[in-house]
Image (tube, rainbow, N blue to C red):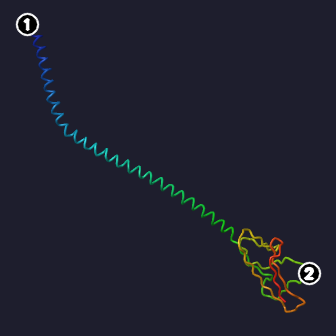
């Protein structure tokens, strides 16, 4: 009886095990059947995500290219801005003008006569942009190359014994002479 009981328990265990396996297989098949639409949905979603990522990757590449182009343009603009600022500074430094007269106010003051060439020192300096005129020596030093305009007004009293003359020198070389009798 003991042997039969052990054999029955063993047979029962095998049949339960076989029944569970068959039952598990049915359950597994049902789960797989339920997962198949989900899997195809997942595949569709993943396909869309991959496509979207490809588009985004292409857009990022284009944006990076545009960014590099913009950076190059910005550097060029900054370089041009620096050059413009430097030119402005040079132009400001190169602006030169002076206006002066021998008398402080009005007229009636005589200068000379001189028996030798004498540098006249203007007593009234109206304008001295660029500080090219030295009011202590009476000498104008051109700080930059360019065209300069000098105007001179002479007045003679009509006496041939006392002619009036003025000369303009550049680097001790006579450039211009004006006479008045």
Q: Residue at x 15, y 24 (%)?
A: 21
Q: Quadrant of residue 8?
A: top left
Depth check, front residue: 57 or 168? 168
The N terminus, quarter of image:
top left
Task: Answer left or right for 105 relative to 64.
Answer: right
Q: Residue furthest right?
A: 115
Above-or-below relation of 49 to 20? below
Above-or-below relation of 21 to 98? above
Residue 71 circle label: none
Q: Residue at x 13, y 21 (%)?
A: 18
Whichever of labels 1 and 2 marks the residue nearer the N terminus, that label is 1
Task: Answer left or right for 175 relative to 38.
Answer: right
- Indicate the position of residue 95 as horizontal and vertical percent values: 68, 71
Depth check, front residue: 66 or 174? 174
- Indicate the position of residue 167 as horizontal and vertical percent values: 82, 79
Q: Residue at x 19, y 37 (%)?
A: 36
Question: Mark 2 packing: few (<14 Cα in 10 Å), some, or many (20+)?
Answer: few
Q: Residue at x 38, y 47 (%)?
A: 57
Callouts 1 and 2 close, C-beta under 8 Å: no
Residue matched to label 2 = 115
Depth check, front residue: 133 or 9? 133
Residue matched to label 1 = 1
- Indicate the position of residue 47 as horizontal and vertical percent values: 28, 43
CA separation, marks 1 and 2? 164 Å
- Indicate the position of residue 84 as horizontal and vertical percent values: 60, 64
Q: What secondary structure is marked by label 1?
A: loop
Q: Quadrant of residue 101?
A: bottom right
Counting every numbered tag in the picture gives: 2
């Amino acid at each position: 009886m003991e042997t039969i009981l052990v054999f029955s328990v063993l047979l029962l265990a095998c049949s339960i095990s076989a029944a569970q396996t068959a039952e598990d297989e049915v359950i597994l098949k049902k789960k797989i059947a339920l997962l198949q639409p989900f899997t195809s949905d997942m595949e569709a979603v993943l396909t869309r995500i991959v496509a979207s990522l490809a588009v985004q990757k292409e857009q990022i590449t284009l944006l990076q290219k545009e960014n590099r182009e913009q950076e190059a343009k910005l550097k060029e603009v900054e370089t041009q801005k620096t050059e413009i600022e430097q030119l402005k500074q040079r132009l400001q430094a190169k602006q030169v003008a002076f206006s002066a007269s021998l008398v402080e106010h009005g007229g009636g003051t005589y200068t000379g006569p001189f028996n030798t060439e004498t540098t006249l020192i203007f007593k009234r300096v109206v304008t001295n942009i660029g500080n090219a005129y030295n009011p202590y020596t009476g000498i104008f030093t051109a700080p930059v190359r360019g065209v300069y305009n000098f105007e001179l007004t002479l007045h003679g009293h009509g006496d041939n014994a006392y002619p009036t003359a003025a000369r303009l020198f550049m680097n001790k070389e006579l450039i211009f002479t004006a006479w008045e009798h």
